[in-house]
Amino acid sequence: MMAIFHTPKEAFSALRPICVKITKEQTVSNVQCLQSQLQKVGDAALQELQEYVLFPLRFSLRTPGLKQERFVQSVVECIHFIISRTCVQNQQQLCDIFSELSLCLSSPGNHGKLAITSEELKMAVVQGFIALLHSAYGDILLCLYQPHMLPTQGFIISLLLDIAEHEKSRQLQILALKCLLVLILQCDCPDMHCSFDNSDHMQVGDAFASFLPGITLAMSRIISGDVKQGHLVTSYAIKVWYKLVGLVMASDQVSKKHHDKKTLFAEGSKLAELVICRKPEWVKNTANKLDILLRKLCSCAAGNPHWKVRLELIELVYHLLSYCNKSLKQSIGYLLEVLVGLLGDERPEVHTRCSQVLRNVTELCMICENKDFTDVLSENLHALTTALPRLMRTLDDQSKLKSLGLLLGYLKLLGPKVNVVLNSTVHLGRLSKALMQVLELDVTDVRIVEERCLNAEADDLQHQMRFLSGWDHSRTGDKPSMQKKYFKHFTEESVFALLQQTCRVLGYYGNLYLVVDHFMDLYQESVVYRKQAALVINEMLLGAAGLDVDVLHKRETPVSAADLKAIVTSIIEEYTSRANWHLVTSIESEHETGLNTNQPTFQGFTKGSCNDCLHTSESLTVHTMNSNIWQICIQLEGIGYFAHVLNKEFRQLLMTSLYPVIEKVGAETLLISQTATRTLVDLCEACGYDSLQELINLNSDYLVNTISLNLRRLTQNPHTPRVISVMFSYSDASLLPLLDDVIQDVLLSLDHYHNEKAQLIFNVLHSLMTALAHWFPPKHRVQKEDKAHNKACRSATTAEEIHCFLKEYQRQKNLAEGHVEDIDLDKTGISWARIAFSHNQDISFISNAIDASILNMCTVNNYLLALRRL
């Protein structure tokens, strides 16, 4: 409504009759009439007539006797209307109105209790309090915090607490909590407020020290109450709690000397009993009691289903860490634990704000060089790492996630100061052993050992050709998916992700030489720790390079490329050493690993001279082979990680790492082969090669050199033929000029090791034939019918020729060795043969010996078919 009366004189003429009437007749209609007239008065004129207009309203409230609730409500609403448009400039008037409003809610029979009144009246009185506190002009508001106002303050606070705790109206509860915030000068409304200096806040803190126990207890009960009360009530209760504690227990206030105001009053007076002097003894005792309440309310708030309550809890922690880090010293550890625990919250708002607060707290403490802060974090970290193995064994996955989130949060909070912890042998030992136990793999899955790669001799040539043509070597993104790791003490992927981040943060902030040396010692110390230590080392190197690591603030000095390269070189040397690379992953690989020239032959085995070998096989368990498989896979993953750490600098390390990786690509165990293939793709991507073919071709010179050297010592390097097969599979015809000497060495090896390695060497020749057929496809296709007929004819002829040749070869061999008695080949089996055909025939050659006990006639036919296609 537009104002009609702009001058005090006009307004006075209009308002005087109704004011006089209210004084004589205290009715609801008269008060409503006054309020309607006030709407026609301008703000400036109303300010001049404020005391005159308020007088009849205040007089009606002070009049003894029972009053109708509706009348009291209309009076309070009219007072609220007046003071919301004007400023209260008189201290006495402010105190009087403050007291008169409080009496509206006082029980007639018990002035210390809340009267049984309507929600509307309570709402009007609380809104009147808020409007009165906002209307106080300048520092006149401070008169409410004088010692003589403590009884009135206490009465109003008790009324507000009663409303906030017991009222059913959610709106009324929130309004009472907002009024408490205004009382402690912590209003969160958008209106402009008078600014107060430190001495003013000191006065308010002294006053509210008397009410600290009652308010904090009431707020704690509200926070831990039923979630049905709504998230706003809980959020405002949390805000009142930490704003009040931050005011009364502020470190900059309690550290100052306080004048004992009790001396201002007569000894034994009730007013003197209400006054609190915040001396060190009182601060210490109060802090201990607040710590109990703090743990209770934080526990309830952290588990609240509404994310805004958890968000307000973050503000509580931040406020107390910022303003009460000295007075609430014993609670800092728990506050940090709460903050770190909320870092993994599912809501992005909570997670983001928590990260910001953690970053701010860390930077604040780094600027202040707060040693207590670092000590608290170190103690919390040590206690957590000590209990972590037990927690991971006994808790559910959700609780495990929380515990690991705490561990990660402590490391992030420490930041560069994590070296203070790592330099302690005890702390580093606890941390490393905790990681070793938590990361223990589950090696009971038999399928890992059972799953084998497709053997070349078991499949026909057509299948091999489809495999080679289906695999796109030019696309490095077509790498096999990573096999999921199964751990003993947890199943959730999110738990492993937290452990990965923990290791990366260690590598990011920690002294890399120190932590890598420590975990390499664990790697070498025991087979039990080897897989876990390799996992930790792999992740730490990623963190040291700043790859996929989430941190609160940047480190001071990043690890140099030279240091990274030196560390990676030493780790790869350890990984690919014979003791850690050529592990037994199957019964067959056990014999290959232990191969020597004195190993029993087929004839010796039939005579029973292989007891030692049988004993070893019996003692080898599936768990051992499974563990070895996972160790090799983790080491292969590590090499791929290291390549991404160094990028193109890793090219200089290909001379020592590429050959072992290719060797594992040809492994019989499926998991090892897939992991090695993935690692090969990682090497290709990191080193800047366009395809696996380019990777192998450009590094084929020293690959071929290593192959030639190893073929001459095949007993010490039994896996060398696999490397040749893999090179055939992933390369092209440009590799042929380098292969002439290699093929001669292969044939020579067949002569030397025909009793041990015939099958493996024939697989190499089979791979060569397949690759040649793929590289040089036939130019003219033959009709399918003729081709099938010729294939059947040739197969029959070839089988007969081979049978006759082998019989003659066996007879000649026995004669040469001095065995003149006749031998029945069908009963004793064929030992070995070297087959040669005329170059004029369709089949050019098949060289070296064939053990009939290992390689049956179908396999020979497969080789012959491959040769025909050439």
Image (cartoon, helix red, strand yellow):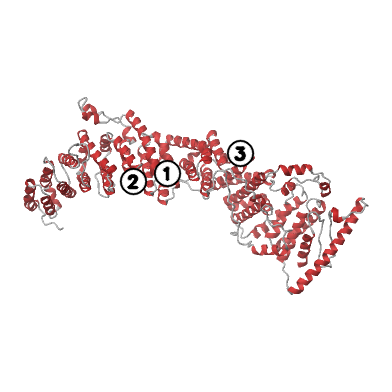
Image position of 384 (left or right of 739): left
Of labels 2 and 3, earlier in sequence is 2
Report crowding for label 1: few under 14, some 14 to 19, many 20 or more residues within 10 A (C-alpha). Answer: many
Residue 700 vs residue 210: left or right?
Answer: right
Q: Position of residue 394 (x, y in %)?
A: 52, 40
Query: How far apart in space, not on screen, are marks 2 and 3 (Cα)?
Result: 48 Å
In the rendered image, the vertical position of residue 378 relative to residue 745, given as above or below: above
Residue pictured at 68% horizontal, 50% vertical: 660
- Image position, residue 530 (x, y; %): 62, 42
Which of these two is toward me, 683 or 401?
Answer: 401
Which type of secondary structure does the marked residue at label 1 adopt? helix
Task: State the image coordinates of residue 854 (x, y, percent, origin top left).
Answer: 78, 54
How far apart, in angstroms, are the residues tagged by discs 3 and 1? 33 Å
Residue 370: numbered disc = none
- Residue for badge 1: 358
Circle 2: residue type:
Ser
Q: Report which quarter residue 763 is drawn in.
A: bottom right
Q: Is residue 187 above or below residue 806?
A: above
Sequence-wise first label, 3 or 1: 1
The quadrant in which the N terminus is found is bottom left
Labels 2 and 1 touching (C-beta < 8 A): no
> In the orientation shown, which residue stands out farthest toward the top?
267
Residue denoted by label 3: 522
